[in-house]
């Protein structure tokens, strides 16, 4: 990172090329990195045009605007330098309730979505749109399946639910004529980890891979397997639900796969999901600020790891696990990247600690029958 530093009494200000990860989208800009001498506080200021490039907000006479959202100029007056045309984007993110994670030595900052924003997306009723690649790099959108009932199945190579993928493919084939499709999403962070299990299942359904954790974040995924039912109009008929397609791990989960698949068949063939619209809303769990901070830390950690900053990545992954230990998807998906067995002693020790604290490992919705 090429930079020039100016030391002041309490803060070191550095002008450098910075990487901004705005809700997973990466932009490189020139900016000012200000780090307090004690390392307790780090701030980033960007030129007004770079704020627009990185965050999509434009400085207008009435304030900072993106689409229909405008933050009044009076609100941001204390965090911008109008003469220098600079905005403190870390303070700006705080105004929006968005979490920030920074690694000064790498010149990288991640700005996540707020808990309110994430929660509103799911409780709105319509399944959030996304685009992800399959194992061959071909991209597919959720909305490609509009007009069909969809079981959005989240799984991972680091979970026993990887053995369920062939059964989900059988469900897909058996009910295809009824206007039903499975859409599976592996939440692995490397394609090569998920690929062998996808190849073995030989899916005719779209089997996608969420290597950056964008969709896991969007759907507030706390563990796998998680299944979301989506109707023909793209509305959520059954929100995040722990559903296995086989009974291989019934002794561990206590869940009856036959019952879950029976309820799925009933929904596909009769339209009865077992839940009314109000119940879907009531059963949709809201994200928390801690969970969004954890996902933001993990986003930064993943970028750091991929760019050779291993030690810093480990620290941010650890921070993510501390912030939201119940978010098993976030910390367990990092284990293979850090050389830790995701099915080994450390995993079971963490699960035992959660259970002792009364935090569920699996989160099935009320009885489907």
Image (cartoon, rainbow, N blue to C red):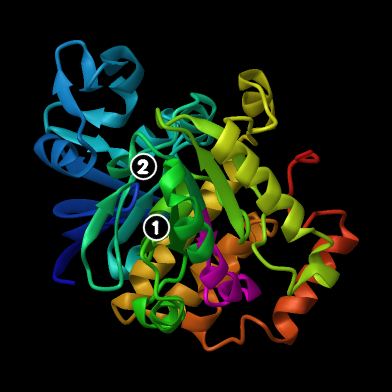
- What residue sits right under mark 2 in the picture? 90
- Along the horizontal axis of the image, is 88 left or right of 244? left
Residue 287 is at least partly visible in this image: no
Residue 32 badge: none
How far across and down, in percent of the image, does residue 189 sit? 41, 71
- What residue sits right under mark 1 in the picture? 102
Q: CA distance from mark 2 to mark 1?
A: 9 Å
Q: Nearer the viewer, residue 188 or 64?
A: 188
Query: What element does badge 1 sit on?
Result: strand
Q: Residue at x 38, y 76 (%)?
A: 190
Q: Which residues are magenta?
A: 153-168
Q: Earlier in the sequence, mark 2 or mark 1?
A: 2
Classify the position of the C terminus by image quarter: top right
Q: Residue at x 62, y 80 (%)?
A: 342
**Category of crowding for the residue at label 1, using alpha-carbon neighbours closer than 10 angstroms: few (below 14), some (14–19), many (at least 20):** many
Classify the position of the N terminus by image quarter: bottom left
Asked whether the beta carbons under mark 2 and mark 1 sit within 8 Å of each other, the answer is yes
How far across and down, in percent of the image, does residue 86 sit? 18, 36
- Along the horizontal axis of the image, is 83 left or right of 246? left
Is residue 123 on the magenta stretch?
no
């Amino acid at each position: 990172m090429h930079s020039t530093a100016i030391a002041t009494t309490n803060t070191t200000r550095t002008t450098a090329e910075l990487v901004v990860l705005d809700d997973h989208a990466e932009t490189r800009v020139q900016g000012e990195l200000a780090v307090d001498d004690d390392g307790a506080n780090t701030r980033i200021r960007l030129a007004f045009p770079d704020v627009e490039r990185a965050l999509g907000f434009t400085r207008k006479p009435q304030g900072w605007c993106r689409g229909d959202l405008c933050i009044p100029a009076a609100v941001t007056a204390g965090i911008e330098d109008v003469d220098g045309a600079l905005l403190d984007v870390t303070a700006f993110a705080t105004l929006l309730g968005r979490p920030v994670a920074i690694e000064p030595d790498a010149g990288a900052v991640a700005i996540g979505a707020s808990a309110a924003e994430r929660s509103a997306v799911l409780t709105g009723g319509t399944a959030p749109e996304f685009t992800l690649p399959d194992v061959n790099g071909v991209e597919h959108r959720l909305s490609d399946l509009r007009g069909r009932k969809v079981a959005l199945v989240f799984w991972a190579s680091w979970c026993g639910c990887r053995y369920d993928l062939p059964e989900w493919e059988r469900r897909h084939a058996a009910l295809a004529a009824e206007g039903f499709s499975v859409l599976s999403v592996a939440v692995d962070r490397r394609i090569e980890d998920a690929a062998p299990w996808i190849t073995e299942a030989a899916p005719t359904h779209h089997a996608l891979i969420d290597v950056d954790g964008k969709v896991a974040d969007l759907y507030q995924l706390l563990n796998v397997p998680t299944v979301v039912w989506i109707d023909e109009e793209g509305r959520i008929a059954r929100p995040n639900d722990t559903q296995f397609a086989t009974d291989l791990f019934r002794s561990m989960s206590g869940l009856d796969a036959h019952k879950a698949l029976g309820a799925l068949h009933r929904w596909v063939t009769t339209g009865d999901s077992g839940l009314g619209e109000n119940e879907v809303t009531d059963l949709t769990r809201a994200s928390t600020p801690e969970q969004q901070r954890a996902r933001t830390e993990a986003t930064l950690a993943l970028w750091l790891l991929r760019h050779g900053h291993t030690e810093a990545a480990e620290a941010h992954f650890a921070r993510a696990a501390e912030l939201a230990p119940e978010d098993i998807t976030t910390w367990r998906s990092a284990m293979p990247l850090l050389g830790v067995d995701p099915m080994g002693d450390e995993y079971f020790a963490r699960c035992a600690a959660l259970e002792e604290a009364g935090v569920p490992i699996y989160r099935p919705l009320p009885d489907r029958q």
